Amino acid sequence: MQLLADWERFRRALTDRGPSLGLPLDATDAPTPDQRALFGTPPAVRSF
């Protein structure tokens, strides 16, 4: 049960703070190829 609670807490934090962490939740909000080349970014987050 703790695993499920932790996972839900993680999902909430990612939804709330994902953009400030550089994790685009929407593919249209992802950095441009030039920005990715300059700064490097993680791939877009996929919902489960």
Image: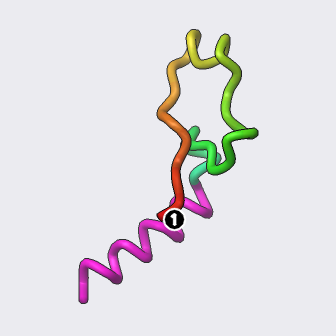
Tell me which residue sits at (24%, 84%) in the image. 2
Q: Position of residue 34 (x, y in %)?
A: 67, 11
Q: Is residue 47 magenta?
A: no
Region of the chain picked out in magenta, as a range = 1-17
Q: Which residue is mark 1?
A: 13
Picture layout, residue 2 above or below residue 47: below
Q: Position of residue 27 (x, y in %)?
A: 67, 41
- Which quarter of the figure has residue 28? top right
Q: Main secondary structure of the magenta part?
A: helix
Q: Position of residue 1 (x, y in %)?
A: 24, 89
Of residues 47 and 17, the one nearer the viewer is: 47
Tell me which residue sits at (53%, 60%) in the image. 47
Tell me which residue sits at (73%, 39%) in the image. 29
Helix, strand or loop at disc 1? helix
For residue 30, side relative to residue 38 (left or right) = right
Picture layout, residue 9 above or below residue 27: below
- Which quarter of the figure has residue 33? top right
Of residues 16 and 25, the one nearer the viewer is: 25
Decide: few, some or many residues near mark 1? Use Cα within 10 Å; few <14, some 14-19, many ≥20.
Answer: few
Tell me which residue sits at (42%, 67%) in the image. 10
Q: Position of residue 17 (x, y in %)?
A: 59, 56
Picture layout, residue 16 above or below residue 19: below
The residue positioned farthest toward the bottom in the image shown = 1
The residue positioned farthest toward the right in the image shown = 28
